[in-house]
Each structure stands twice: as structure tokens, then as C-alpha cells.
Amino acid sequence: MQLDKIPHLKHTENDNFFLLSGPCAIEGEDMALRIAEKIVAITDELKIPYVFKGSFKKANRSRVDSFTGIGNEKALKILRKVSETFNVPTVTDIHEVSDAAMAAEYVDVLQIPAFLVRQTDLVVAAAKTGKVVNLKKGQFMSPESMQHAVTKVTDSGSEQVMVTDRGTMFGYQDMVVDFRGIPTMKQFAPVVLDVTHSLQQPNQSSGVTGGRPDMIETIARAGIVTGADGIFIETHFDPSNAKSDGANMLHLDYLRNLLTNLVAIKKTVNQLQ
């Protein structure tokens, strides 16, 4: 599977990685535009192909009182506005079969959450929209088993598929990244490393997911070295007050320095190949 089969995600002339980045959830129009504007400026400067990420709703919550969204149509319209304002593609999660056609009217990439990647009807519905499908590797799945998820997309008539590693469960309250999985899954489709979700510490007794944002650069660097085609980073200008996943998001102020370092590492890796 080559990246040139996926619109918007082709490597640049410098053979750079691509970036999926934005807030965990769409909290409002102003915050989405503010985050997108900053990331677009950075990625344009560093020549990184960019896809704005934002969930229009959050279905997988630890508690019933956790934030789930501002309304489906309202959030999806904000994603469309980001795309039109900055001329960048967008990606969002879908959770039910009915979400696929609805979200496809507004975004370029439909993302299948890790907990749902074995749901055949959901994966097939996403593939049949004709949009790019981003399959999150289940925290409970081996890299090799993701071949079957990819095949569900291709058997549905679409070649526009990529796989994202977001870590593997390690005990009850931690995640680890097995970097052997990146070259393994690249045999099936382009591979993205979801850096920030890989640093989650789920199932906390408080009912609020924890995280290790201090390890973001370490994991991201390793992902570039081991051949990830893309990097996924959730970011926010005020993570401590973000309505979802604030504990493992990168502060927006730190994104430029991180991406600058990753571009330098990617150039070195390219020279060694």
C-alpha cells in the first residue's frame, strides 16, 4: 500500500512524515480555529502534510457525566469550517454505522476507534463512503491481526486505508508501544503512530484517564526512527482545562519545537536508507 493512494497524505518533496493533530474533542468554533491556525503555520513552515483532528463526539467515556460533545451537527460544521478556512483535510472518529454517512458529508478521513476496530459493519460502512479510513489498532490486538481489519476495507472496494498504533494495554492502568508493530503493519497499509493516546493511563479509580505527556517527545522520536509514515498528536492551548484527554495532550506551545526535532530526525533516517 502506497501513500499516493491516499489523498492529502502524500509525502512532501523532502519525503517528510505527515501529521494528524488537533484537540481531542471539538469544544467550540473559536478553540478549533485557534488551534488549527497555529498548527497550519507550523506545518507550512516545516513542509509537513497536515490533517486537522477533532472528535465531533466522544462515545467512549469513563463516567456518565463526562463530556461527550457540543452536538453532532454543530461540531461537524466546525470541522468543515476549519477545512475551508485553512484548506486542510480533517479527520474525526465515528462510533456507529449511521455516523459514517453523516460524518462523510463534512470530513475527509473517518477514524475507527481502537475499541471498535473489530466491528465489521462499522468498518465496512466507513469504507463504502469513499473517504480515507483510519483504523486504530485495538489496545487488545497484535500488529499482525490488523491485516484483517485492513482487508475489510479493501474488500469493500476502497484502497484508501491506513493503520494507527495507539499502544497496547499493559496491566490495568498503563499502555506500552511495541515498536516492532510499525514495520509489521506497514506491510498492510501506511502506519501512523498515535503518540499521545499511547501515553494514556486508563481505568483510574477516579474515573478520569491519566497520562504521561512528559514522554511525548521520546515516543514520537522512536516512531520516526522505526518508520512511521505519520504522527498523531492531540494538542490544546490549555490541556489542564480541556474537556477530554487533557492529561495526555501536548501543550500547543510545545508543538513547534517537537515537530522541528522530528523533521530533523526524519531527514537523518532518510539519509541512512
Image (cartoon, grey):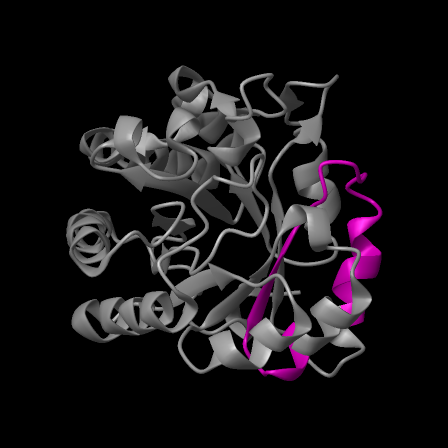
Specify the quadrant that holds the C terminus: top right
Question: Residue at left 64%, top 27%?
Answer: 177
Dividing the picture into quadrants, the one containing residue 112 is bottom right
In the figure, is residue 78 to the left or right of 265?
left
x, y percent for residue 223: 53, 33
The reply to whether residue 190 is in sight is yes
Query: Residue 103: where, in percent of width, then height?
Result: 48, 74
The residue sitting at the front extreme is: 65
Residue sitting nearer the eye, 145 or 235: 235
- Magenta-span inclusion, residue 139: yes
Q: Quadrant of the N terminus?
A: bottom right
Q: Residue at x 62, y 52 (%)?
A: 113
Residue located at (80% from left, 40% from top): 141
Kindly identify the residue that appears in the image at 52 percent across and 26 percent down: 209
From this viewpoint, is residue 272 visible?
A: no
17 within the magenta span? no
Picture mark count: 0
- Residue segment shown in magenta: 126-152
* Above or below: residue 21 compared with residue 237: below
User: Where 37 falls versus 105 (above or below)?
Assistant: above
Residue 111 position, x and y percent, is 56, 60
Q: Is residue 134 positioned above or below 157 on the image?
A: above
Q: Position of residue 93 (x, y in %)?
A: 53, 59
